[in-house]
Amino acid sequence: MSAIRKELEKQIGDLSAGQTELEERLDKQQKNVASIVEKSRNLREEFVAQLPAVEAASRRVPGASTITVKPPKFDGTTWAVFHRQFDAAGMQNKWMPSEKVVHPLSISHGKAAHKHNNAPTEATKEDIVVTTGPFW
């Protein structure tokens, strides 16, 4: 009986040692995964920070015209003409949607500038047209 007991105790000891080894390996793997996750977060932050520059560069087509068109001033009275000129400037300058909202703020004066002060900051160009009417 004591031989069986010794054999069982040996097997239990081996299992405990194996369990300890597995727990240590698991802990090491968890640390490796945490390190990889942290590195991926850091890389993502770097990529996000570089995204505006990459987007700006991607809008420039090699060999294409680099002429920048300045949109006309807008006083709120000649909407149809201004709208066509503004859209043409936006196409030539390859503006992003967010830029299409910012530019009117800088070129509006008179009634149109007053209307822009009431537009929400997150509004798109289309939102501003709908909410403020043809003065924008």
Image (cartoon, grey):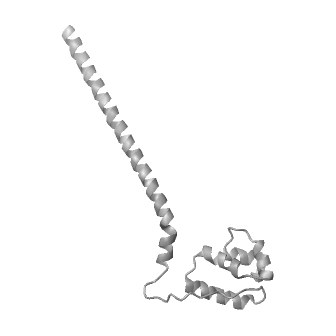
In the rendered picture of this protein, how many numbered marks are placed on residues? 0
* Residue extending furthest toward the top: 1
Q: Position of residue 104 (x, y in %)?
A: 69, 80
Which residue is located at x 65 percent, y 89 percent? Answer: 85
Foreground of the two, 46 or 19? 46
Q: Position of residue 110 (x, y in %)?
A: 80, 83
19 is higher (above) or lower (below) than 61: above
* Residue extending furthest toward the bottom: 81
* Residue extending furthest toward the left: 3
15 is higher (above) or lower (below) than 51: above
Q: Is residue 1 visible?
A: no
Which residue is located at x 19 percent, y 11 percent? Answer: 3
Foreground of the two, 11 or 98? 98
Which residue is located at x 57 percent, y 76 percent? Answer: 96
Where is residue 124, by image quadrant?
A: bottom right
- Where's the C terminus, which quadrant? bottom right
Foreground of the two, 20 or 11? 20
74 is higher (above) or lower (below) than 58: below
Q: Position of residue 63 (x, y in %)?
A: 43, 88
Which residue is located at x 35 percent, y 39 percent? Answer: 28
Where is residue 26, by image quadrant?
A: top left
Q: Is residue 117 visible?
A: yes
